[in-house]
Image (tube, coloured by chain):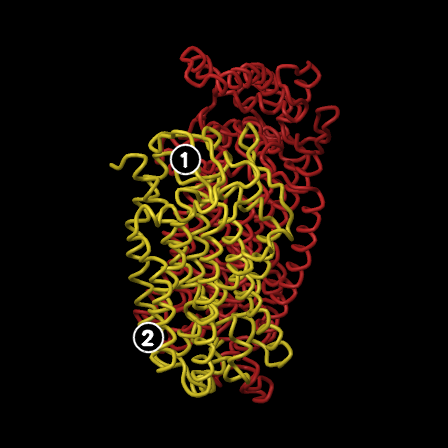
Chain colours: A yellow, B red
Amino acid sequence: MFDYVTLKFIWWLLVGVLLLGFAIMDGHDMGVGGLLPFVGKNDDERRAILNSVGPHWEGNQVWFVTAGGAIFAAWPLVYAAAFSGFYFAMLAVLWALFFRPVGFDYRSKVGDPRWRNAWDWGIFVGSAVPALVFGVAIGNVIQGVPFHFEDNMMPVYTGSFWALFNPFALIAGVVSLAMLVSHGANYLILRTEGDIQRRAGRASVIASVVMLAGFAIGGFIVAGMQGYLITSPIDPGAAQSPLDKVAIQQAGAWLGNFKQHPLLIALPALGFLGGLLSIVFALSKRGGLAFISSAVAELGIIFTAGTAIFPFVMPSSSDPRSSLTAWDCVSSQRTLSIMFWVALVMTPIIIAYTTWAYRVMRGKVTVEFIKANDRSAY
Amino acid sequence: MISESLVDLSRLQFASTAFYHFLFVPLTLGMSFLLAIMETVYVITGKTIYRDMTKFWGKLFGINFALGVTTGLTMEFQFGTNWAYYSHYVGDIFGAPLAIEGLLAFFLESTMVGLFFFGWDRLTKIGHLAVTYLVAIGSNLSAVLILIANGWMQNPVGSEFNPVTMRMEMTSFWDIVFNPVAQSKFVHTISAGYVTGSAFVLGVSAWYLLKGRDIEFARRSFRIAASFGLASALSVIVLGDESGYTAAETQETKLAAMEAMWKTEPAPAGLTLFGFPDEKTRTTRMEIHIPYVMGLIGTRSTDKVIPGIDELEIRIAKRIQTGIVAVKTLEKLRKAPKDAELQAAFKAVQADLGYGLLLKKYTADVSQATQEMIAKAVDDAIPAVAPLFWTFRIMVALSISFLALFVVSFFFAAKNNLAKPWLLKWALWSIPLPWIACEMGWFVAEYGRQPWTIHGVLPTHLSTSTLSNGSLIFSLSGFLLFYTLLLVAELFLMFKYARFGPSSLGTGAYHLEAANNTAVSGKEA
């Protein structure tokens, strides 16, 4: 149906869409989890916060799982090189994530305040650490990761764990964390009332300001940073190995796509616009509009990062020809095509029943509701 | 070359985290359908006791489900973190069912499970029932897709090697979906899950009956569990036999090892019921041998021969010789990818490429392999007999005991005569046994696949990531620590809520509340 190069590009977009879906859906309950110990001052308030995402976090987390699965299926080399290369960072994310399902489900099943408080911090760690580390990982990808492929295509990472936490990557981590926190806070404005809503509004504004500042600073750094360029002729439509190409580092290369296609400036502009609108609506307690605004900010920021490095998806700083691009990190045409059709059919269905689930559970979650449903609520 | 200790540590980590994940999966599979059945009865009869049953067993289901989700994350991460070469080499095929699992099944299950717990007051009776069924269907669909992926590891159909990208690529999606190994594995595995769920509900209900509390609640639960369990135990055995049949066709080394078939017997081969296999002398001591049975199960015929270990070794040795040629030809082809002659030469031998790679454990340059190395590789290619022989027999013996338990339970439940302490105790003490059977079955399937990750295609020792032993020891320790903590919390809650029983719902209608209203205070929920 589609030729190989079109499918490769579609999958670059689809991975972006899945990551965006993750940021919008799982992102808001991660933001809520990250705010839990600060916005909820007593047990009833915390339970109200937890129950605002209670029926949904489980389904939302599947955006994360599916994004991982899709990268495995569509970009196996990225999955192999990034997961093994970022070994300790991945473990940190994974171990932190352990505390979410269990925290949500187990926390209110025992009355002891120590038990509940411990799980609250577990949920905090399980939400904030992944949000931070994802950003740190993206920050490293933008700078290039020290890895190469051996002749048989075995990926070898040659950097250290601590080198991941360099200043630019930390800025990216803060942007990612602040982005999800403001998004989660906006969700709380929508779904709670009274003190919780007031505190969430304040948190949303602060987080948006941090996010906007970080995004702007990051942008300046990227403009002067060593980007990457493919210098050998390649045929994006053919099956190929990353090692077939020649690539170099070049200062300012990450601005190339924006210079070539000025319309793409709309992406960073959306990032800023969404962040500013989120602040405006959070201040006026219009949770729904604030939520949409922070989702727009996420779209702008995620696709700005992706577009800046396109067609690279994981450049190698130690051996640039090992860099992975949207043309050479991909699965076969058949696999990409099958996966595309499955995604095309299933995504609208998933969005439809997810929307239905939110409709069923709509309305404010109040402290009174918690008291009335002591046995069945989180 | 990857060090052997790294391979061993990686295997240990994968095996232990998979074992651990599989503590929670069977109960989810089984209980999701039991909940759907209970709620169906509620919707049809309108009796609130069935709603309470759905809610109470649903609580225990939820405690288990949380850890199933948590430990499933590890599985998804681990192919990339610890099996990077595997992920590159077969991601084109293996990744697809995993991604489809997310889109088709896991989304459905996870979205609906939230409404199952929180939607009781928001949905109509029928609406909630539909949600419960969708949870069950979602979790079972998950199992199909995971087992399609796993079935392909056992019997890699619908794919071929691409020298340009240096990996396996899909040639037929439908061959992979309708892989006979995947299909028989799926029905066998979900039936095992149903048995686990039934035995759990049966055993816990039996405990209430023994204590003489919540009799009505427990009796009805017991009856449903006994009926569902009986059907499932029958299907687990019948479909286990089907698995044996597909194994005979596609995984001869596994079958030969688990049945300790040292020598090829004339058809139809006999079945070794019991004995003590001895790897050194290649004999089975104190063997109880039943003529003809193995041949009938394995080939569904009286004239097809099932190869024993002796014959398999001869065949493997030949394939390794061709495999050496395949590895050498591939190396040349990589340097001259356009050479049509080399392409044709490689095509002729590529089916045995994996067998050539077996030698990489002993030498980087396969063409320099000595006779001794080849002999070792042949020896590697047959999995160790004793562990498979024993785990398989324990699994089968347990399955038969479940069938007996469910037959007897069903009989007395149908006669409405459950005042039988011996039966109730039997049911109670049987609770842990399905887990043992499930893990044994998992062990037979995966250990029996060794020395391959993808049978005949990719040896295990080539599949790992390039990590240091220290990294693996660190991660293993972390998993040990976190998984222990989580298991303690899970068991604590499981026991706590099983002891509360339906009183934990706070309806005021059950044992502890009637006897002593302060026993379950408002805070304990």
Q: Are marks 1 and 2 on the same chain?
A: no
Label 1: how many Cα within 10 Å (few below 14, some 14–19, many 20+): many
Q: Secondary structure beneath disc 2?
A: helix
- State which mark lies toward you, 1 or 2: 2
Residue B375's spot in the image, x, y percent? 68, 18
Horizontal and vertical percent for residue B343? Answer: 43, 15
SS class of the residue under badge 1? loop
Residue B449 badge: none
The residue nearer to you, when weighing B309 against B122, is B122
Q: Quadrant of residue A92?
A: bottom right
Circle 1 chain: B
Left or right relative to B366: residue A174 = left
Position of residue A8 in the picture relative to residue B360 (left or right): left
- Look at the numbered discs 1 and 2 and tell me whether their residues touch, using CB distance below 8 Å: no
- Subunit that carries the residue with mark 2: A
Mark 2, other Cα within 10 Å: few <14 / some 14–19 / many ≥20: some
At x 35%, y 43%, the residue is A339
Q: Amino acid at mark 2?
A: Gly
B319 or B196, nearer to the observer:
B319
Residue B498 picture location, percent across and down? 57, 71
Regarding residue B386, the answer to whether it shows in the image is yes
Q: Residue at x 50, y 48 (%)?
A: A141
Residue named by callout 2:
A288
Q: Amino acid at mark 1?
A: Asn
Quadrant holding the N terminus of chain A: top left
Residue depicted at 55% across the width and 14% down the height: B325
Whether A310 is drawn above or below B106: the answer is above
Q: Which residue is mark 1?
A: B179
Query: From the viewer's perspective, is residue B289 above or below residue B238?
Result: above
Mark 1 vs mark 2, CA separation in Å: 48 Å
